[in-house]
Image (cartoon, helix red, strand yellow):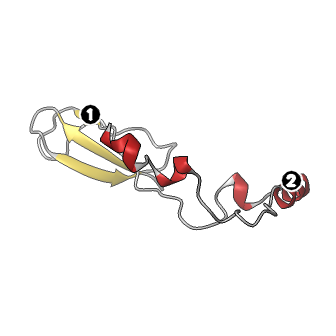
Amino acid sequence: MPVYEYKCTKCENGFEVMQKITDSPLTKCSSCGGKLRKMITNTSFVLKGSGWYKTDYPSPDRKKAKEQKKPDSPNAGEKTCAENGPSKETAKS
């Protein structure tokens, strides 16, 4: 169930309420009877770990393409200049 944050326009009292999405928003402050405003806040919902991205479950065609892209050259593990960052000569100028 989502958690919504409200703030009273009269007494500035702020609080959080766990409500169903289908529930009507609260309108009256329980402390002073003032009008409540629903606040827009960041969510605390975070997807972590594997299995949440399209790349975690590749299709058979994608698996084939990935296998074909594997480098066969002996220098495959070396980084390019762009990956290593600017050279000393470039950084000085």
Residue kind at label 2, given as amino acid type: Ala
Q: Residue furthest front?
A: 89
**The C terminus appears in which quarter of the rendering?**
top left
Residue 63 is tagged as: none
Above or below, 65 against 10 in this view is below
Q: Report how far apart the C-alphas of labels 1 and 2 lie in the structure.
A: 52 Å
Image location of residue 48, percent across then percent down: 53, 64
Image location of residue 75, percent across then percent down: 70, 63
Residue at screen point 9% across, 38% down: 11
Residue kind at label 1, given as amino acid type: Arg
Crowd rating for badge 2 (residues with CA inside 10 Å; few <14, some 14–19, many 20+): few
Q: Image check: 86 left or right of 65?
A: left
Above or below, 73 against 8 in this view is below
Residue at screen point 67% across, 64% down: 51
Residue 65 is tagged as: 2
Residue 37 is tagged as: 1
Image location of residue 70, percent across then percent down: 80, 61
Image location of residue 2, percent across then percent down: 45, 52
Crowd rating for badge 1 (residues with CA inside 10 Å; few <14, some 14–19, many 20+): some
Front residue of this view, candidates 37 and 41: 41
Number of numbered discs on residues: 2
Q: Secondary structure at mark 1?
A: strand
Q: Secondary structure at mark 2?
A: helix
Front residue of this view, candidates 42 and 49: 49
Can you tell which of label 1 and label 2 is closer to the viewer? 2
Rendered image quadrant of residue 49: bottom right
Residue at screen point 16% across, 34% down: 34
Front residue of this view, candidates 65 and 4: 65
The numbered mark, 1 or 2, whose residue comes first in the sequence reads: 1
Rendered image quadrant of residue 26: top left
Front residue of this view, candidates 93 and 7: 93
Q: Image check: 25 left or right of 48?
A: left
